[in-house]
Image: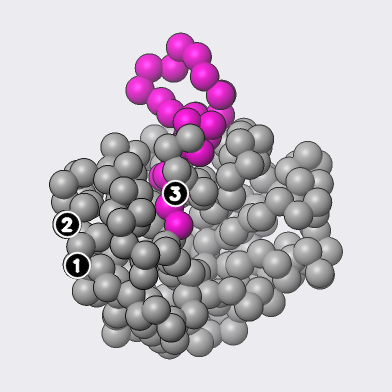
Amino acid sequence: MSDRVLIAGNWKMNLDPDEGARFMEQFVLDAAGRAEVLLFPPALTLDSVRRALLEDPPARRVSLGVQNIHPEAAGAFTGEISAEMASAAGAEFVLVGHSERRALFGETLGDTRAKVSAVQRARLVPLLCVGETLEERKRGELERVLVGQLDAVIGTESIRDGVIAGGAFVLAYEPVWAIGTGETATPGDAAEAHALLRSLLSERLSPAVSDRVPILYGGSVKPDNAAELLNAPEVSGVLVGGASLDPESFAAIVRAAG
Ligand code: 13P
C-alpha cells in the first residue's frame, strides 16, 4: 500500500477569493508533519490561495486542485473550464466523479471516463471519487457500485496504460450516506471498502502499480474521528468537506496524520 498520507480539503462552493486568502493566513501547518495537503477551492478562489502559498514558505507542502473540469481542452462550452486551464492556473489535481456531480449534475460513468482522460492529457492527477448510496448499501450492492464506478475509468485501456506508465492516480471512497450528514463510516466499513478497491486496482493494474495509488476516505471526517479513520487498514488519507472550511479544524485533521 502507498506510504503517502494525503489530507485533502474539498471546499465545494464555499470561500470566495478574500475568504480563501484569510483561511490561508490562519491555516498553520507543523513543518515536521508527514502529510501532504491538497486543497480544492472553487476555481475563482484558486489564485488567491496560490498567491498565499507563494508568500508563505512553511505552507509549501500544500498542493492545489480544482473540483471539476470539462473534457475538452477549449471551445464553445459556456461556463466550463478545461484541465489545461486548471493546470495553467496552478492546479495539480482534479476531482472527478464526486457524488454531488453525479447526483446533482447528472455526471455519468462515461463523463467520469472522459474527464479522467482529459486530466491525464493535461498531465494533472485525477482524484476519482467513488461510493454507494444508502439504498445501494442496504440492497447489498456495495461491490457492484464500486466495481462499476472504478471500471468505467480504469477499465479503459488508455487510462490504465497511462497509470501503469507512471501517471499518478488517486482514489477516494466516499459513501454518499456519510457526506455532509455527520454519519461517518466506521473504520471497519472504510477498511472493507478500501480492501475491495485495493484488490480491484491490483487486478486491473498490477499489485505493484496498485500499491502506488493512494485510497482516501471521505464522509464527515472531523478532528475527533480523523485519527481512527487514518489508522484503518488501506486508508491512505482523507477527503474532507465541511471540516476543511475552518483553518483550525482542518489543521487538526492534518496533525492527526502525524
Ligand atoms: P463532508 O466532510 O462535509 O461530509 O464532505 C465530504 C466530501 O464530500 C468531500 O469531498
C-alpha distance separating marks 2 and 1 = 6 Å
SS under mark 1 = helix
The answer to whether 81 appears left or right of 73 in the picture is: left
Give the residue type at disc 2: Arg
Closer to us: 203 or 127: 127
Residue 63 relative to residue 196: left or right: left
Q: Which label sits in the foreground, 3 or 2?
A: 2
Which element carries disc 2, helix, strand or loop? Answer: helix
The stretch of residues the image draws in magenta is: 63-87
Q: Amino acid at mark 3?
A: Gly
Residue under pointer 2: 22
Tell me how many marks there are.
3
Q: Main secondary structure of the magenta part?
A: loop
Residue annotated with mark 1 = 26
**Residue 27 place in picture, x, y as percent:** 25, 68
Contact flag, marks 2 and 1 (Cβ < 8 Å): yes
The image position of residue 171, as x and y in percent, is: 58, 60
- Residue in the image at 36% along x and 54% along y: 54
Label 3 to label 2, Cα distance in Å?
18 Å
| Label 1–label 3 contact, CB within 8 A | no
Mark 1 burial class by Cα count in 10 Å: few <14, some 14-19, many 20+: few
Q: Is residue 217 visible in this depiction of the protein?
A: no
- Indicate the amino acid at tag 1: Gln
Residue 24 against residue 228 in the figure, above or below: above
Residue named by callout 3: 65
